[in-house]
Amino acid sequence: MTVPPCPQRCHRFALASLLLVAGGSGVLETAGWARSSPALASPRPGRSLPVASLPVAPPPIGMPRLASEVSCPALQRQVAQVLGGEQARWSVSVGDGSGRLLADINGRLPRVPASNQKLVSTAFALDRLGPDYRLSTQLWRLQDGTLRLTGQGDPDLALPQLQRFARLALATGAGSAAPQSPVRLELAEESSQNWWPRGWNVADRAYAYGAPITRLAVTSNAIDDAVSNPPSRLQTLLRRSIAQNGGQQVQLTLVSARQPLPGDAVLVHEEPSTSMHGLLSLANTESHNFTAEVLLRQAAGSWDVVEASRQEFLWLSDQGLPLEGVRIADGSGLDRSNRLTSRFLVALLLRMDHHPYSRDYVSSLAIAGRRGTLRNLYKGTSLDGQFFAKTGTLTGVRSISGVLQTVDGPRYVSALSVGAGTPNTTIGKLLRQVQDVSLCPPTS
């Protein structure tokens, strides 16, 4: 069954229809994994969503790690032949399920990964937060009767949720008084200097893919283009919703989202996001920048992108991955100061395919010829339905990394290019060579 493509700004019901596709090896008995407790963005007094308990990570016995030396000369020669005179423009690495490095061209050379960066932020989020995690938007009542709306960046927050909050604000804020009594509502939000990672190009910030990253983001802060002032739009929509529900007076105030809630705050209502699988799929299948950025921040427990990136790097270090030349600047890959290597990405894919939540991770990727950013590539070829991957595109940059299913088990492939002539054609040729398992017979 083919899953229909999901639009750029998916809603939770569309996301819920994405099928879980078996992709990981599911080796739980030998899969060790460094995991921290679920990260929380801020203290949550009063009642709140329960945090799912995570299973204890098994000991790291038998966890395969990517080898440092190439062990399949035949595939190495074929990859070099496919790249031809453009070898200097490419970094290509291939590994298998046992950790063999089957081929490697410039695999240690750091390159701009574009949206392949999302493979890192989604792995970090899944491990830290677990597959049952949901983002939450919450309405609180403070002791003096003031209400406060807090959020964690739900990418699907939209008018139906705002209307529910408006009705509850009227009922709760007015108490036993008439509906015309003033409602005092605080909106907890990030300051404008934190809306974008500092390395995002100013021109990109005007487009939907470069929308500001805020905690209370109606339709991911994008309509056709980016919303330039999300708090102002939110206030307009809330005033309109309150008026439609009979409210005549409302006092809306912006407060810092980093200002902790009082310990006696009472949770009035919360709107959960789609499931973690839906969030991962939005980031990886549809390459949604906003969602990837939110997942990075929530997993790190910090909405300071510099601190969140530092926490992610520390997590990567705990996994024993090859980090030489790796630089983390954001969660989505829109920042051109990110640097990854193809060897690092293959090692990450290998690790995640042996993670207890490998099924959630691999099934969140686009599928060649079937779904997401790969829906129109390699359709009707031997790669159709067999390659689960994340694409990446910036001006002059083309990247793709993922899991290729073969008759001898999974192959982990990463190809990063800068200035290549026909990258999609080259990638297709590379993948078909990797599919030829006769080039790399299994070791006894």
Image (tube, rainbow, N blue to C red):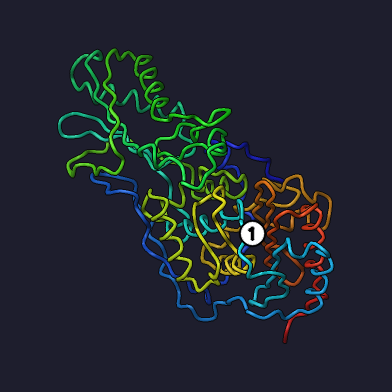
Residue at horizontal 82%, vertical 58%?
382
Left or right: 290 with respect to 444? left
Expressed as whole percent of the image width and height from the top left, the position of residue 9 reads: 57, 36
Comparing 88 with 5, the one in front is 88
Expressed as whole percent of the image width and height from the top left, the position of residue 142 reads: 20, 34
Circle 1 is placed at which residue position?
Answer: 22
Q: Residue furthest left?
A: 144
Comparing 436 with 192, the one in front is 192
Within the image, what quadrant is residue 387 found in?
bottom right
Within the image, what quadrant is residue 76 found in?
bottom right
Residue at horizontal 62%, vertical 60%?
111
For label 1, the SS is: loop
In the depicted structure, whether residue 161 falls above or below residue 122: above
In the depicted structure, whether residue 380 falls above or below residue 355: above
For the C terminus, give its image quadrant: bottom right
Q: Mark yes or no: residue 410 visible.
A: no
Expressed as whole percent of the image width and height from the top left, the position of residue 342 reads: 64, 65
In the depicted structure, whether residue 372 falls above or below residue 142: below
Callout 1 amino acid: Ala
